[in-house]
Image (cartoon, rainbow, N blue to C red):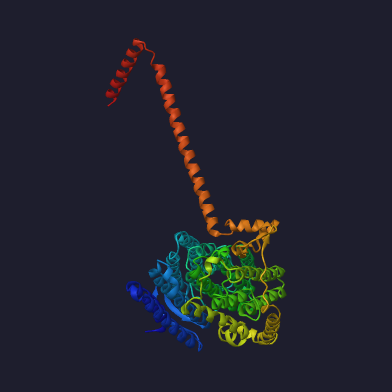
Amino acid sequence: MNLFILVILVPALAGLVGWVISRLRNELSFIGAILTLYFATRLFINALGGELSYRLFEVSGQWVWFRLDQLSSFILLFVAIFGVLVMLFSFRYMRNWTRNRSYYLYVMLLLAGANGVLLAGNLLTLLFFWGGLLVVTYGTLLVGRPGAEEAAGKALVVVGLSDFAMLLGIVMLLVATGGTDLVPAGPLSLSGGAMVASYLLIAAGALAKAGSMPFHGWIPQAAKTSPATVMALIPASIDKLLGIYLLMRVSFSLFDIPGNMAIRNVLMTVGAVTVVGAVMMALVQKRMMRLLSFHAVSQVGYMVLGIGTGMPIGVAGALFHMLNNVLYKTGLFLSAGTVEFWTHDDRLDRLGGLARQMPLTFFSFLICAMSIAGIPPLNGFFSKWMIYQGIIEVGGQGNRLYPLFLVAAMFGSVLTLASFLKLLHAVFLGQRPRELIRVREGSFTMWLPTVLIALTCIAFGVFAFGLPLSRFILPALPGRMAAILGQPGSWLGVWRPELATVLMIIALGVGALLYLLGTARKPVRGRTFVGGERIADEEESRVPGTAFYSSVKELPLIGEGLRFGEGGALDLHNWLKGLLGGLGEALRSAFDQTLDRAFALVGRFVLAVGAGASKLMTGQLPLYVSWMFLGAALLYLVLLLR
């Protein structure tokens, strides 16, 4: 059977058979994930020799067909890799969740649907798998704690409406051009109103899938109830890969956004607002999963910023950051899942001091946290550095807004670092609560995926040119962008990660030596006093990480913005609820007023008839006899006329 069919059919069948034969669901799901990785690897290798395609059938003049190039093939490969890692982690972790039977089915269907999206040759084929993913995502989010129905429903509304917008954009494109090929002979110009509207509607579907503002509200909501593996797989990996993939396709293969600075400014504005808005919300969160979910939103802003620049180095940085984000966000969610598995809690004031008991989880979390914060020489720094250069190049084209975008991107990195300093202290450092004394390291299947991800973050940062950029990112760039980046002077700054790594290792070694010679062998245990009285109970003197940055909420402008955002003002779902609620209230009020006026009119009519009839009822017998004779005369007249 053709590899295009197998990479979609195998995970779906493995999930279905495992759901029917529940005793073998772990084994069948893992085998299905491994086979999917095998087929994806073969397709990736085959695509190195050139574009591949496979036609299925024709419907009303439009072919349903598959297409694979180096952009879709490398994302296909990493979807399969993360599917295997999350599946391996799930074997132990999901034992604590009662709805785990359906979970494995949904995960395998997610892999199948994601592969279908990446292999789609035109927008109609993509739309079929895209819609299927919406249904599967809804089912996957239902696998959670009480309240999961609300989160799943919110995702269904927000992503479903954006998918409808994407459908409308595809219809407009089909009417205007007669074709829906994802990679036409040449990118379409964004010169007419219909073309601009079509691009924006399709881009809205991509941004919602990626989790950009204002389509992000379902992600923090899902973090309250969903397992860590669901958060690692959907908003952290698959949705990011698919959303940015589609945005890349429609921005450079289907349409030509480099030729329209207004559209690029719109994208960069969305990216900048997403970076700063989401990271500010993450800064003041008090639950581990919810904090990570806001960072999953914030990092999308960097990718949208890079794509919006339209510059080769910015676009390459966006693709690289997409890959990096999937790495460290998956590692962070899975590491947090290990902590939650043993502590049965993700509230930051209930955690602390777990580094000694969970050294491998701490190592993985630390590396991924430094990477997302953009600490050199890790991979997160390298991709952000490329995006910064892309923004600077936009300024060279005469865009006067570029300083705002650059400041937003750099400010977001600073706040991300501050946020993860808080999280590291609250979870792994500081004082350990008494009830967590028996917490230990996760099992082999739980720490192995996170350690592999952490090591990959290091390798992709230190050897960025030799590994991810040359093998995955640059070959996947659209048009002549890869050739432009290969020219002398195309890289504005100079960053040598290998040399920087050596210098940092030397600096860290010297620092460790000074620490060991200084205070490590002479620990001093102090006593805690409050108001002049000694506190004997260590638990009372414990300082949780939730107190970090609490004063930010008191700042005049930023504090109001945080309260504004915490209330859901930036959430599209709340906008829709408010709009529909207001419309419903207006209709109810109009209907009530109409009924009131109708009842009042009928009442006045009845009163008038009663008043007239009361005047006729005088109580005089001659008058009544006269009315009787008048009625008889009228009746006789009617009979004569007939």
Residue 288 visible in the displayed image: yes
Q: On the rendered structure, is 596 left or right of 507?
A: left
- Which residue shows up at 34% across the image and 14% down it? 624
The answer to whether residue 239 of the structure is visible from this angle is no
> Who is closer to the viewer here, 142 or 467?
142
Rendered residue at 35%/72% (across/down): 19
Residue at position x 34%, y 16% in the image: 627
Between 186 and 409, the one nearer to me in the picture:
409
- Residue 94: which quarter of the image? bottom left
Q: Residue furthest bottom?
A: 49
Q: Position of residue 27 (x, y in %)?
A: 38, 79
Q: Is 577 in front, or is 62?
A: 577
Q: Is residue 561 above or below residue 166?
A: above
Q: Is residue 507 left or right of residue 315?
A: right
Q: Quadrant of residue 414?
A: bottom right
Q: Quadrant of the N terminus?
A: bottom left
Residue 469: x and y in percent read 59, 84
Looking at the rendered image, the quarter that the C terminus falls into is top left
Number of callouts: 0
What x and y, as percent, mark residue 326? 54, 75
Residue 563: image x %, image y %? 62, 56
Q: Is residue 594 above or below residue 572?
A: above
